[in-house]
Image: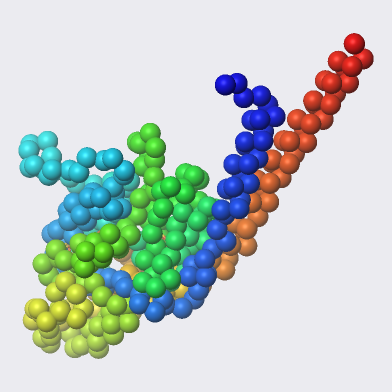
Amino acid sequence: MSLNRRDFLKSVAAASGGLLLSKATPSAATMSKELPPEAVGILYDATLCIGCKSCMVNCKVENSKPGGALYTKGMQEPTYEYTNERIWDAPPDLSGKTLNIIKVYMNGNGEVKDRPENGYSFLKQHCLHCISPACASVCPVGALVKDPVNGIVHYNADRCIGCRYCMIGCPFRIPRFEWNSAWPEIRKCQLCRHRMQEGKYAACCEFCPTGASIFGKVVDLRKEAQRRLELKEGSESDFPLQTVDSTNKRTRKVSQYVKHVYGLNEAGGTQYLLLSGVPFDLLGFSPKVTDAHLPDLTWAYIAKIPAVIVGVIVVGTATWAITSRREQNKKDKRE
Ligand code: SF4
Ligand code: SF4
Ligand code: SF4
């Protein structure tokens, strides 16, 4: 079946119209400045982290299963046989295959843990699940969505058009693109929401042996973070393993803390909270990220995109109509 220009333009216009109609004005949850009622998240305490990367390994394993953030329809579930080819996986950064990464800060002789000078610290980097996510506010087709109840910012590959605005919009440079794939998708942590349907929680927390990463309701995580900041350095305290309300606890000597919970206010607040003995700017968090709710700023710009698309379609269709009319006039004169 041949498709003439009129049919082609009609179909382009229809498809574009459909796209525009489906253009999600950012949802109320995305534009909200309030923590969702059942918001869940993670507290990462760098002073408890030993850099074992168990969280990274299990993030990859659990998210490569159906429903996971690394899983693509029809993908073979990995078998994880530890052959010589598969035993090493040491990614240097987040990528289309890595949703969570442990990095290290080191200064001087790097001898003392959790000290900015002549010391070192670990950092666990993944999506912070912003209360007002800039990634979702700039997505022109609503492929990134904030759950209005638990606040998880998740991704719908079926809607994504691959524009990569979310990568530019995110103040923490989290979303990554599958550059090597024929049908690339955006990849980022989705807080293991696929596991919650099975009554499980974030894999990185479930498999963390020290309690450095714990899962729970954000209100409880905030209280636990505040409790830790009030502890006396050098004293002993109990730290829960896996979840904030766990009865399974480890007694540890309290380390030095920077007196700040990262994520309490940054970018309008996030559901991933961090504690550290080393200032957060030294761990790679840009001091340029203020407490402002970014969707207030980004939406003013992104709202113009549908108008641009409509403009292109209208001008294109008008040009085609004028050209056709001229050709028809010439033909009429010849006849
Ligand atoms: S950290 Fe970036 S990717 Fe994650 S919710 Fe916030 S803006 Fe989106
Ligand atoms: S919550 Fe899940 S997807 Fe996110 S970093 Fe942890 S294991 Fe990975
Ligand atoms: S599993 Fe826990 S202790 Fe090990 S690297 Fe991850 S956060 Fe740190």
Is 137 located above or below residue 311 in the figure?
below
68 w.r.t. 2: above or below: below
Specify the farthest residue to the top. 334
Taking depth in this image into account, of 329 and 140 the one nearest to the observer is 329
Q: State the residue in front, 67 or 69.
A: 67
Please indicate whether residue 14 sits to the left or right of residue 184 in the image: right
Residue 241 can be seen, yes or no = yes
Q: Is residue 276 visible?
A: no
Question: For the N terminus, which image quadrant?
Answer: top right
For the residue pair 243 and 326, the one nearer the viewer reads as 326
Occupied quadrant, residue 309? top right
The residue at 28%/53% (across/down) is: 67
Question: In which image quadrant can residue 196 be found?
Answer: bottom left
The C terminus - image quarter? top right
Give the percent coordinates (x, y) of residue 45: 22, 72
Residue farthest to the front? 1
Instruction: Using the image as rendered, state which of residue 310 and residue 280 is in the foreground.
Output: 310
Q: Position of residue 61 (x, y in %)?
A: 18, 51
Q: Position of residue 301 (x, y in %)?
A: 62, 58
> Residue 129 in the image: x percent, y percent?
38, 66
Q: Name the residue rendered at 57%, 61% in the picture.
A: 25
In the drawing, does residue 28 fall left or right of residue 150?
A: right
Q: Residue at coordinates 20% horizontally, 88% vertically from top-left? A: 231
Q: On the rendered structure, is 75 left or right of 331?
A: left
Is 195 drawn above or below residue 151 in the view shown?
A: above
